Each structure stands twice: as C-alpha cells, then as structure tokens.
Amino acid sequence: MTVSVEDQKALRNAFGAFPTGVCIVTCSVDGEKLGMTMSSFNSLSLDPPLVLFSIDKRANGLPLWERAEGYAIHVLSQEQTDLSNRFARPGNKWEGVDCRPGEYDAPLLSGVSAVFVCAAERVIDGGDHRLFIARVERHRTDADRYPLVFAKGRYATLKLGEPMETDWPLAIHY
C-alpha cells in the first residue's frame, strides 16, 4: 500500500501529538565518529535490559551504523537544543563538541540528562526505517538536568508536578 504525501504529512502531524524525549545516539566505526539526533528512542525490556532506536533507510551513514558494535545514547537536557539541531543536520557535527571516547569508541557527550552505553544486539527491518536493538551495559542519570522534549514539531520543556509514588509493576500492565 502506498501512502500519499498528504497522508504522510497528516500521519506525521498525528505522531507529533505524542511528546518524545530528544536523544543523540553516537557510535564509531573504523575510527569514524557518527552521531545523530533521534526522537525514536524507546525502552524495550528490563530483563534483559534492551532499548531501541530507528534510522531512516535513506540516511547516508546507515551502512556504517549497521556495522557498529555499540552505541552511546544521550538523553539531551533542556539546555541542549543547539546540540540537538547540530546533530540533526548533515555536515561537521563534531567540531568544538565536548566529548570523550567511551566503550566501543562511541563518543560520550557532556551535559546530558542521561546516557546509556549499549552493545549492538540486532538490526531489523521496520518499513522505511531500520530498527536498532541494543543491550544496555551501563547507564548514568543526572537528576539535576531535565530532559529536552519534542512535540508538535517544536522543542518543549517539562513543567514538573509533585512526585508520585507508584506501585511497580502497575496492575494495568497485566
């Protein structure tokens, strides 16, 4: 089934009603640093600890991403819109960026809300995207940094209410 351009735009707008966090995923292949802004990051499983992200099949660097042995997934903080914009565009993304090499030589960015260091688990087809499933090997969170949010085609910030106690797992899950 082919979806018209108008239908694709309407669907994209509908997807935009669901707020997402903003991540930069990094990796290194054959000494080349790769990085890409993504809102397609999701937790997948606690046992084993798995996450996923997706990359459009038209992305120039896709063949390199598919060869990566591991990734660093950075949940950007509210102060990092400029970094998000930089890694969302083609061109030299790394000049002047504060980073250091991590596991799998994946560049680690500073100032983020959270980071997940992951081993590549598998890559599968997902329509016009490739789905990257990764196993979380370690993670770090900065409780003082609030995550950057994206909704309806623009950045947003969270207005946090009072903390809620939750019973985990919630009965609704079962």
Image: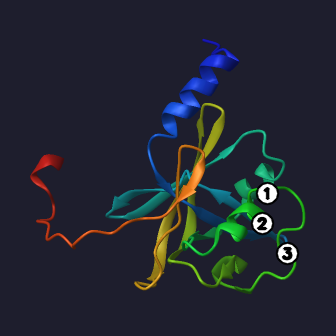
Q: Amino acid at mark 3?
A: Gly
Q: Is residue 128 above or below residue 22?
A: above
- Residue sitting at x 51%, y 55%: 52
Residue 124 in view in this figure: yes
Q: Position of residue 21 (x, y in %)?
A: 50, 59
Q: Which residue is mark 3?
A: 31
Q: Is residue 90 above or below residue 128?
A: below
Q: Is residue 104 above or below residue 14?
A: below
For the residues carrying marks 2 and 3, which lies nearer the camera in this image?
2
108 relative position to 141: left or right: right
SS class of the residue under badge 3?
A: loop
For the residues carrying marks 1 and 2, which lies nearer the camera in this image?
2
Q: Earlier in the sequence, mark 1 or mark 3?
A: 3
Asked if disc 1 and disc 2 are in contact, CB closer than 8 Å, the reply is: yes
Q: Amino acid at mark 1?
A: Leu
Q: Which residue is mark 1?
A: 64
Q: Which residue is mark 2?
A: 34
Spatial CA distance of label 1 from label 3 is 11 Å
